[in-house]
Image (cartoon, grey):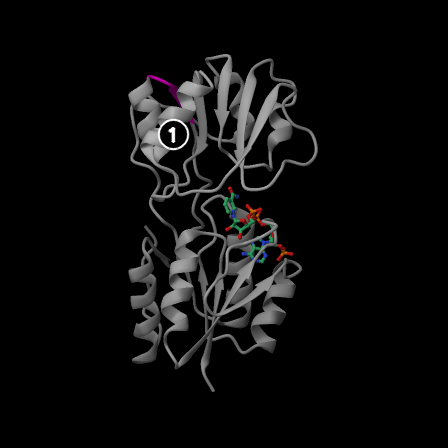
């Protein structure tokens, strides 16, 4: 029976990982998605969608499906899912590695804040390009600025009073992002420190166009969790397991 690997997904890296794992006949890969995106792009291997029902639900899923290893490749800001995964994997005794892609290369010109809630008071201009996703828009409901909100799906619930929604998903190009900043006469770009090549073009574009940047810093890493930075390292961690046990990975 193939060895079952659970990939907690929702990122480009999770997609790439699923492709690598699905190509190995000795493995069975299931990618789990939260179900936030209405029409997720097709994924290699099997896919399950929706929450597990907290730590206990995930622990039960791991046991029932006899999962051999968990790779948490969720988004750097999906802190709750990561915490649940670590707790459940520990409870069941299933090895887990966290795939945490590097953040964007820092720029001294950026204003860095520690949460989305801190963004409104850090806004310097009147026309804001908001790329932090459709959740959390309520934070900007009382802001006087005009917002260009880019998201994969239409926003729901409270949102900025003055906004235009742009439905799109990466990857984006620097030229395309520059044109967008000019078209909407953007003063300030707001982004999470998501990292990854699919969305970094906006930062180069902002630099080139003289647009201010506000970056929301990542939630802290959980202490003691085996962590890798790339798909290749995650695969190495997994392959090591087939040669006699999952090697420990030092947290960064
Ligand atoms: P979160 O706040 O950390 O998690 C909230 C709950 O959503 C979890 O407790 C879990 O529910 C469920 N969940 C989250 N990720 C899941 C997954 N991969 N599979 C099954 N259930 C999942 O998560 P989030 O920040 O809302 O992110 C949700 C998804 O969107 C993740 O897959 C993440 O990779 C992706 N994403 C997030 C962001 C972001 O900025 N946060 C950006 C791009 C993509 P239960 O407790 O019921 O298991």
> Could you tell me which residue is drawn at 48 percent across and 24 percent down?
129
SS majority, magenta: strand
> Could you tell me which residue is drawn at 61 percent across and 54 percent down?
35
Label 1: few (<14), some or many (≥20) within 10 Å? Answer: many
Number of marks in the image?
A: 1
The residue at the far bottom in this view is: 1
Q: Which portion, as a residue range, is magenta?
A: 210-214
| Residue 7 place in picture, x, y as percent | 47, 64
Residue receiving disc 1: 177
> Could you tell me which residue is drawn at 49 percent across and 57 percent down?
9
Quadrant housing residue 16: bottom left
| Residue 71 place in picture, x, y as percent | 44, 63
| Residue 6 place in picture, x, y as percent | 49, 68
Please, is residue 1 above or below residue 117 in the view? below
Q: Is residue 235 left or right of residue 187?
A: left
| Residue 47 place in picture, x, y as percent | 54, 66
> For numbered disc 1, what is the local secondary structure?
helix
Whether residue 30 is visible here, answered yes or no, is: yes
The residue at the far right in this view is: 157
Whether residue 225 is visible here, answered yes or no, is: no
> Could you tell me which residue is drawn at 41 percent across and 52 percent down?
12
> In the image shown, does 114 or 179 lie closer to the viewer?
179
Please, is residue 140 above or below residue 231 in the view? above
Q: Is residue 245 left or right of residue 62?
A: left
Please, is residue 170 above or below residue 1 in the view? above
> In the image shown, does 124 or 165 lie closer to the viewer?
165
* 25 in the magenta segment: no
């Amino acid at each position: 029976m193939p060895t079952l690997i659970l990939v907690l997904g929702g990122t480009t890296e999770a997609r790439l990982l699923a492709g690598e794992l699905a190509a190995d006949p000795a493995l069975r890969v299931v990618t789990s998605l939260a179900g936030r995106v209405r029409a997720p792009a097709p994924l290699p291997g099997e896919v399950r969608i929706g929450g597990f029902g907290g730590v206990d639900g995930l622990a039960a899923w791991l046991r029932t499906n006899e999962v051999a290893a968990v790779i948490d490749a969720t988004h750097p800001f999906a802190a709750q899912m990561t915490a649940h995964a670590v707790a459940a994997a520990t409870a069941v005794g299933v090895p887990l590695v966290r795939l945490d892609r590097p953040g964007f290369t820092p720029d001294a010109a950026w204003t860095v804040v520690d949460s989305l809630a801190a963004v409104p008071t850090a806004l310097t201009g009147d026309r804001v390009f908001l790329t932090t996703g459709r959740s959390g828009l309520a934070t900007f409901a009382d802001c006087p600025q005009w917002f260009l909100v880019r998201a994969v799906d239409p926003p729901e619930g409270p949102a900025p009073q003055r906004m235009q929604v742009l439905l799109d998903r990466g990857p984006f190009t620097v030229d395309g992002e520059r044109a967008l900043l000019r078209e909407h006469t953007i003063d300030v770009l707001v982004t999470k420190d998501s990292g990854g090549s699919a969305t970094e073009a906006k930062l180069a574009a902002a630099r080139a166009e003289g647009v201010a940047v506000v970056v929301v810093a990542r939630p802290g890493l959980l202490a003691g969790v085996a962590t890798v930075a790339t798909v290749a390292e995650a695969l190495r961690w997994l392959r090591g397991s087939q040669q006699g046990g999952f090697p420990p990975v030092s947290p960064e």
